[in-house]
Amino acid sequence: MEAKHLCGTIDQEGHLVKPLGEQMAEFPLPPMHAKALLISHEFDCSIEMLTIIAMLQIQNVFVFPTGQKHKAELMKRRFSVEEGDHLTMLNIYTNFEKNNKSPKWCADHYLNYRGVIRASEIRAQLSRFLQKYKIPMKTCRDVIGMDFADRIRRCLVAGFFNNAAKLHHTGVYKTVRENYTLRIYMGSALMVIYNEVLQDSMRDITVIEPEWLYELAPHFYEFGTLKTLNSKTPKSLQKDQDQIKRHRLSFLMGDVLHDEKLNQFYVKFD
């Protein structure tokens, strides 16, 4: 219920918001996944997002046989995309299709054939939902202008904005919303969004630009300097959302600056 509220699919009385809420309710997906998919045409990446969301539904993309873990890890790195796991999954599936969904190709590349085939089936199912709701099937490979990867990452932010984490000076990540400590292997990006948390580790992460959070989820985030945000009172913020609860968090963008120039996010509500 909370996730649907944050995604803007139910109102304060618990009623489905039309048409997005009603459409999301029919999708056999978590709310964030469904929203990212349903709005993907706005970012010209519905075809790519269809693949990414389908791949997120499987648990283990790679297999690490005993005695071959090092080889499997090296193969995994060959597929890796610097922007993060979501685009890496897109890269894997694209190559899987180019190789005719071959079981041997999967075995040679230490991929979970059954898992990727299952993702293919899920993708076909989700495609039928998009056709039902007449969502345009667009690919950002055909669009001139914004970088291919940026379009996909911005769409992910619009859907997964609640799952954002910032790099802490201690080397761990802190969730933007509740300041929980999370970890990723070899993490160094200032801000990321993630699919889920297993124990204290983020799973399926993508590097994002901090400003995308308040640009693509203005109902959830505010941005400004320490001075300007301190001047905002709960009364003035009341216009945006009844009974707002704010969690202040700050981080540096670029060089170390004077306190008044520290950039701040406010999470607008729980």
Image: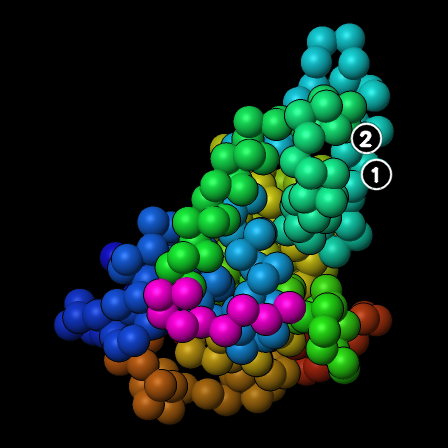
Helix, strand or loop for disc 2: helix
To which quarter of the image does residue 18 belong?
bottom left
Q: Is residue 22 left or right of residue 146?
A: left
Q: Between marks 1 and 2, how big is the CA–CA gap?
A: 5 Å
From the image, give the main secondary structure of the stretch colored magenta: loop
Helix, strand or loop for disc 1: helix
Q: Is residue 42 visible?
A: yes
Instruction: Name the amino acid, label 1.
Output: Arg
Residue nearer the viewer, 108 or 244: 108
Q: Is residue 237 left or right of residue 213?
A: left
Q: Residue at x 29, y 76 (%)?
A: 19
Instruction: Determine which residue is flagged by label 2.
Output: 75
Residue that lies at the very extreme toward the front in this rendered image? 100
Residue nearer the viewer, 227 or 147: 147
User: Does residue 53 belong to the magenta stretch?
Assistant: no
Image quarter of the C terminus = bottom left
Instruction: Determine which residue is flagged by label 1.
Output: 78
Dot 2 surroundings within 10 Å: few (below 14), some, or many (20 or more)?
Answer: some
Image coloring type: rainbow
Q: Is residue 213 visible?
A: no
Q: Is residue 226 left or right of residue 30?
A: right
Q: Which residues are magenta?
A: 131-139
Q: Dots 1 and 2: beta carbons under 8 Å?
A: yes
Residue nearer the viewer, 21 or 54: 54
User: Residue 182, relative to residue 103: is it above or below?
Assistant: below
User: Does residue 136 belong to the magenta stretch?
Assistant: yes
Dot 1 surroundings within 10 Å: few (below 14), some, or many (20 or more)?
Answer: few
